[in-house]
Image (cartoon, rainbow, N blue to C red):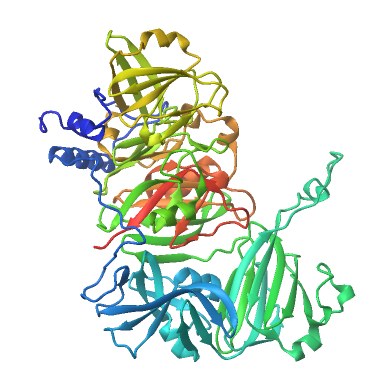
């Protein structure tokens, strides 16, 4: 049976308990109207891997278990390693002693995750670790490129001509920590932990000078420092007045460019301005513009000569704050130097901190400025060695266990224990329901719509990208066939849709006057009448499903109570069905190294097709790696078009690529933070792709 009908057996295994009879039809090859079709080696390998798995009798629905953030994660030898604590940088036996979430730095309290442990369990040799994201965000530590996932080179008030400081990498409860002990020894910090609080005492620091050397590319601000203070960087959008929103309300043309949306870019330094600097540069309170309520005698005004924007620096208590008003799309680079100690802020449209960090086995973090035609785009992406790294598991993730609901990507990832994630397919933001394919471990959480693009993969590293449809037919005991348009979908069209327990415990009507047909154990048991959309809720039977008849009351007499029904299902193309995981979005951008963009064929509207917006995408390289990428803007304007995004994915090495839900949903998560997210409200999304790292 397995060798003669492997696909049918796999499909039956996937749908066990639902009482469906599944049939297959010959492959319908993915093709693009007017475009050449080529089956590259990547497709052939993917298809052969999937068939080989089925011939071996591998159940598609049985995926590698995911390690949650609360579970044990042992990545090194040693019997006395605490559960959830796993040093990666060295093979010695370590014992977790304490951990906390608060830091007191010279009396200033802040939230920061830390751990304390002893090598070989030695009680007098205590070492400390901070999460790398806290080191970046709370201290200003710069992560440097590395090809060794066990160490992380950093720069923090260090001489760029000398060898960077290499901090050992450790993992605890799903988080990546860096051993800061070498940094503390080098800079003379004193550390003492008490409960949830870690107290750090370091030499005090002051801002002794301000320089603004001329640059041809933009502006540079250099702060001369006595000491090595912590600093944080943040930004918030600046609301514009109606006059700023529309500088020409009467419609008269003039030569002024449109006003750029601005942000307040804020650098907070744990240091005070020296009296000498204040005496030389302080301005009177009445001359302050903006912020006239600031303490004038402790405030310094700055003008950026090249870019023409303004800034203020003022001291309050033991901290100095530098505020700059610059365009929202700009990302100034803030970095440190030594001999003398300096904090340097580079301000220009196309600054991007280039990164190439092997973040974990199977996960590489990249950032780079890429050029397409006459535009430059800051691109952030992760390369996933899904095929060759046995510790890398990919899963579709959703905001709630039931399908309705949205949440921030970081919240979804934290809840499920994902180490990295990207936003996924489309959804209706009003009713918070999915609008596209989501399949997890062989279970259809939501069916594809409109023959749009999707990516499918298994836990052995095989993946394919193409357009996808799911065709279901309900067959009655009388031999009548009724088409089912959608399965567990928020997409609405006149006809029949089906909702299973994967949708949740209940279904709430999406349009007025829906007729609900309850099916349990393969038989129709009830007819129910819905009222207004959103006001009628019906329980979904655990051993069956609901049929919703939308503007299709004529089908009801063919489904009398007591009649038996079967579900026949066809996946088009059929080779998608051998993959347990599927995530749909669209349009398909690249196929077999051809740009095959045809959004009209996937029924996207003209505004979507022509728009310039933030975008996210997933691609597949010729050696089987997956690339998940986001682009928020170009250096001098809005984000890429679909064609530009296809070209960007090609530059990242993708021979196949799929556009994901973009715009305000565009988010990329890694190790507890969103990477390079613009300063605006963090979006809530319905679903995404989660990356889970396991012990090897």
Please tell me which residue is depicted at 89% across the width and 74% down the height of the picture: 286
Q: Tell me residue 46's x, y (percent).
A: 25, 42
Which one is nearer the viewer's eye here, 662 or 432? 432
Q: Tell me residue 642's x, y (percent).
A: 52, 40
Q: Is residue 39 left or right of residue 289?
A: left
Q: Is residue 642 left or right of residue 151?
A: right
Q: Is residue 640 visible?
A: no
Q: Tell me residue 316's x, y (percent).
A: 72, 80
Q: Is residue 183 left or right of residue 312?
A: left
Q: Is residue 404 visible?
A: yes
Quadrant where the C terminus sits is bottom left
Please tell me which residue is depicted at 34% across the width and 89% down the height of the picture: 125
To which quarter of the image does residue 610 belong?
A: top right
Q: Is residue 548 left or right of residue 125?
A: right
Q: How many marks?
A: 0
Which one is nearer the viewer's eye here, 135 or 262? 135
Q: Tell me residue 370's x, y (percent).
A: 51, 55
The image shows residue 146, relative to residue 502, as above or below, that is below
Quadrant where the N terminus sits is top left
Please tell me which residue is depicted at 25% across the width and 51% down the height of the picture: 64
Outermost residue on the right side: it is: 286
Which one is nearer the viewer's eye here, 554 or 166? 554
Which one is nearer the viewer's eye here, 197 or 633? 197
The image shows residue 540, relative to residue 141, as above or below, that is above
């Amino acid at each position: 049976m397995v060798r003669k009908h492997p696909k049918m057996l796999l499909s039956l295994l996937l749908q066990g308990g639902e009482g469906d009879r599944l049939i297959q039809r010959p492959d319908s090859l993915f093709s693009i109207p007017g475009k050449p079709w080529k089956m590259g080696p990547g497709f052939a390998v993917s298809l052969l891997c999937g068939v080989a798995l089925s011939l071996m009798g591998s159940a598609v629905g049985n995926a590698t278990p995911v390690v949650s953030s609360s579970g044990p994660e042992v990545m090194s030898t040693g019997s006395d390693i605490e559960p959830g604590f796993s040093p990666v940088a060295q093979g010695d036996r370590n014992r977790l002693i304490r951990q906390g979430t608060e830091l007191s730095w010279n009396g200033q309290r802040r939230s920061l995750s830390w751990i304390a442990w002893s090598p070989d369990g030695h009680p007098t040799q205590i070492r400390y670790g901070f999460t790398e994201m806290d080191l970046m965000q709370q201290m200003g530590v710069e992560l440097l490129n590395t090809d060794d996932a066990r160490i992380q080179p950093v720069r923090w008030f260090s001489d760029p001509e000398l060898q960077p400081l290499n901090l050992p990498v450790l993992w605890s409860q799903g988080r990546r920590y860096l051993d800061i002990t070498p940094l503390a020894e080098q800079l003379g910090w004193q550390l003492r932990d008490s409960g949830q609080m870690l107290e750090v005492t370091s030499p005090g620091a002051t801002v002794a000078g301000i320089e603004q050397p001329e640059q041809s590319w933009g502006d540079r601000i250099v702060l001369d420092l006595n000491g090595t203070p912590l600093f944080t960087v943040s930004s918030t959008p600046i609301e514009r007045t109606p006059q700023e929103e529309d500088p020409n309300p009467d419609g008269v043309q003039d030569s002024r460019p449109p006003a750029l949306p601005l942000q307040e870019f804020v650098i907070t330094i744990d240091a005070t301005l020296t009296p000498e600097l204040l005496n030389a540069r302080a301005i009177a309170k009445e001359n302050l513009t903006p912020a006239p309520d600031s303490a004038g005698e402790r405030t310094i005004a700055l003008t950026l000569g090249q870019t023409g924007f303004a800034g203020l620096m003022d001291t309050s208590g033991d901290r100095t704050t530098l505020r700059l008003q610059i365009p929202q799309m700009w990302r100034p680079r803030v970095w440190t130097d030594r001999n003398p100690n300096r904090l340097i802020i580079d301000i220009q449209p196309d600054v991007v901190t280039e990164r190439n960090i092997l973040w974990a086995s199977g996960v590489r973090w990249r950032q780079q400025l890429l050029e397409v035609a006459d535009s430059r785009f800051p691109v952030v992406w992760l390369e996933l060695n899904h095929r060759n790294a046995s510790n890398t598991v990919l899963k579709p993730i959703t905001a709630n266990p039931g399908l309705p609901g949205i949440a921030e990507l970081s919240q979804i990832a934290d809840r499920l224990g994902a180490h990295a994630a990207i936003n996924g397919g489309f959804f209706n933001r009003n009713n918070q329901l999915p609008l596209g394919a989501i399949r997890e471990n062989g279970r259809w959480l939501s069916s594809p719509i409109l023959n749009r693009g999707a990516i499918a993969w298994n836990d052995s590293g095989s993946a394919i990208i193409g357009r996808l449809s799911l065709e279901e037919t309900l067959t009655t005991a009388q031999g009548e066939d009724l088409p089912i348009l959608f399965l567990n979908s928020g997409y609405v069209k006149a006809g029949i849709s089906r909702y299973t327990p994967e949708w949740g415990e209940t279904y709430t009507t999406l349009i007025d006057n829906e007729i609900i047909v309850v099916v349990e154990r393969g038989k129709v048991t009830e007819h129910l009448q819905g009222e207004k959309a959103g006001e009628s809720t019906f329980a979904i039977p655990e051993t069956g499903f609901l049929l919703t008849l939308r503007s299709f009351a004529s089908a009801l007499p063919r489904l009398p109570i007591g009649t038996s029904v079967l579900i026949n299902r066809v996946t088009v193309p059929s080779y998608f069905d051998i993959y347990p995981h599927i995530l749909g979005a669209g349009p398909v951008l690249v196929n077999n190294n051809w740009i095959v963009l045809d959004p009209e064929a996937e029924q996207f509207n003209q505004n979507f097709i022509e728009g310039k917006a933030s975008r996210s995408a997933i691609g597949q390289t010729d050696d089987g790696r997956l690339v998940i990428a986001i682009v928020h803007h170009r250096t001098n304007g809005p984000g890429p078009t679909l064609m530009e995004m296809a070209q960007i994915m090609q530059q990242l090495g993708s021979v196949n690529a799929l556009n994901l839900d973009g715009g305000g949903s565009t988010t990329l998560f890694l190790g507890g933070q969103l990477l390079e997210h613009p300063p605006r409200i963090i979006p809530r999304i319905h679903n995404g792709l989660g990356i889970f790292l396991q012990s090897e």
